Image (spheres, rainbow, N blue to C red):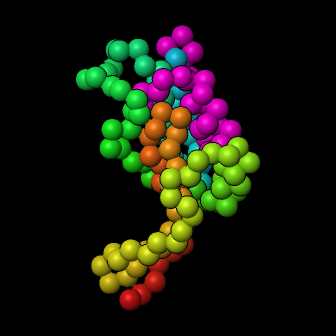
Amino acid sequence: MHVADIAASRAFWWDVLGFLVAFERRDERFMYLERTLADSRAAQIMLCQRNGRWETGPLEPPLEQGMMFQIEVDDLGAIQGTLAQGNWPIHTPLRDAWRRTGDRESGQRELFLQDPDGYLLMLNENLGGRTL
């Protein structure tokens, strides 16, 4: 993701969402972040401060331009607490959603917010499945 300020983005992704820096190239203002779930699956994201090198067209804030990222977490309640402490604006409040997947429903607890550059994030916690 292209970002306007790599330090502000790092603070959000690290301090608020609990991602860790897997590696970074400070001279390029680039970082690769990772957040591991209890079952060892991981969400990964790359952030690069805008420099024109990889931009395929004009970018104007907010940078999201119709994108939404879904990130599964183990404890959405803890993240919600961190967001509340920092008065971070919430796009769509915490809710449980059940969606049909064939002859079953899959459930997730979800919360929508935007990162410092306006990218829409859906953080979700898996609620499992149920038969219709």
Residue 26's place in the image compared with 42, above or below, is: above
The spot of residue 55 in percent (x, y) is: 31, 21
* Residue 86 or residue 25, whichever sits in front: 86
| Residue 126 in the figure: left or right of residue 74 | left
Give me the residue at 67% from left, 61% from top: 77
The spot of residue 121 in percent (x, y) is: 48, 48
The furthest residue to the bottom: 132
The spot of residue 34 in percent (x, y) is: 56, 40
Residue 2 seen in the current view: yes
Residue 22 seen in the current view: no
Give me the residue at 33% from left, 75% from top: 101
The quarter holding residue 127 reads bottom right
The spot of residue 52 in percent (x, y) is: 35, 15
The quarter holding residue 19 reads top right
Quadrant of the image containing the C terminus: bottom left
Stretch of the chain drawn in magenta: 1-28
The quarter holding residue 25 reads top right
Residue 53's place in the image compared with 80, above or below, is: above
The furthest residue to the right: 85
